[in-house]
Image (tube, grey):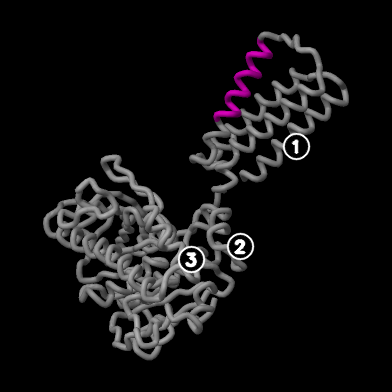
Amino acid sequence: MGTLLFIIALIMEIAFALYSIVKKQNHQRARNWARIAVFIAFTILILFSVIIWSFRWILLAILLFILAVFGTVSLIRNRNTKEYKTSRIVRNTIFMLVGLAIALAPALVFPQYKLQKVTGQYEVATAAYTYVDKNRIEEFTDTGKNRFVNVEFWYPQHAEGTYPLLVFSHGAYGIKSSNASTYTELASHGYIVVSIDHPYHSFYTASDDGTTAMINAQYYEEVSNVNKDGIYTIEEAYGLIQKWMKLRTDDMNFVIDTILEKSKSDNNPIYQHINTNKIGVFGHSMGGAASIWLGRERDDVRAVVNIDAPMFSEIHYDKETNDLVANGSTYTTPILNIYSDDVWVQLDNSSTYAANKAADKIFSEVYNVHFQGAKHLSLTDLPLFSPVLANMLQGGKADIDKYYCIETENQIIVNFFDYVLKGIGSFSPKATY
């Protein structure tokens, strides 16, 4: 929609300019009427939900409103005293095109997209909270304050009974809403999903009291350099991994423990509808690695979904070979691995994925799914929310259809948790989609 509007606006402005130049007249009256009509049309499109009002359209709405007001005033005054000048027409047209480009930039970078269909029986509600960990001081700041963790719940509205708890951890630079379509689909099938913003690991997070935290510059640099040759030794990279995983798993443990405690004493219906005996964890990229870690650490975690991540908890640094190797110890929690092409091609040639490669032999119950043609971020909502950013961050456009990919992934995850946590049906996904 944003691209279409930009093209229409571009054609209109250039057409008016060419017409004025050919006729050697300003045609200001016609231009004023056109701008008033455009603003009215834009308003009608919003009222009839052809354009879904959001942050994408704020700048454009302001620009069109201002142009319509100036056009109306000009028509009322009924004066056009400016002498025709080609240079003025060209200059004004250029300014207008630049203004339109700026106003439409949010809609072009974050295009309006169709919401994923929800297939479950429950309507879904959301709620966001900030938890403060009184046992940890924030290591990314020197304020001496305790670490806070922001969470958001997706849960069945008007719920009755109890539902399994699923805890999600985002990727290296992600945010808690990175897989919102997945949480919504799960909640519609009778799950209470809580997604975590890991402060200073997430791109941006905001607390209940207005406190905000952007991604930490040093952490960003470490993650950016860890896969580059010659920046870190394998041993140094392994040390960084351990540091990142400790913060991630500490956050996840804290959130789960907080929720379990609140389920005993807090009257909030969200906590009272949690089945504390059925807990699953899942995450994308670094969040997937942290989820696997919790699946080994915690006895109350019954199921794990790893989306495109190495199994950091299942490898160690071997000084003799100067490489990363699989621990070889049995992993007993049922796990579903979902891979894009970006990771799939590394399973055979990167020691970072040594445990992933060995999982079929040393894991008690493991399922592997490969989305052919998918890139790393295809397994999140980002290609829907902002194809431009997704393509920039992952180095190009994925071959797989973005709607097919996320909808199929969501259905597979629902089926896995249904099978493991609810005992519904069987689970036998295809190896490749």
- Vertically, is 390 above or below 206? below
The answer to which of 423 and 55 lies nearer the viewer is 55
Q: In the rendered view of the protein, which quadrant contains the C terminus?
A: bottom right
Q: Earlier in the sequence, mark 3 or mark 2?
A: 3
Q: Which residue is mark 3?
A: 379
Are the residues tagged 3 and 1 within 8 Å (C-beta)?
A: no
Q: How many marks?
A: 3
* Side (left or right) of 93 relative to 116: right
| Residue at figure coordinates x 20%, y 76% from the top left | 299
Q: Single out the mark in the foreground, 3 or 2.
A: 2
Q: Amino acid at mark 2?
A: Lys
- Which region shows up in magenta? 62-76
Q: Which residue is mark 2?
A: 397
**Residue 11's disc number:** 1
* Side (left or right) of 195 relative to 432: left
Q: Main SS of the magenta segment?
A: helix
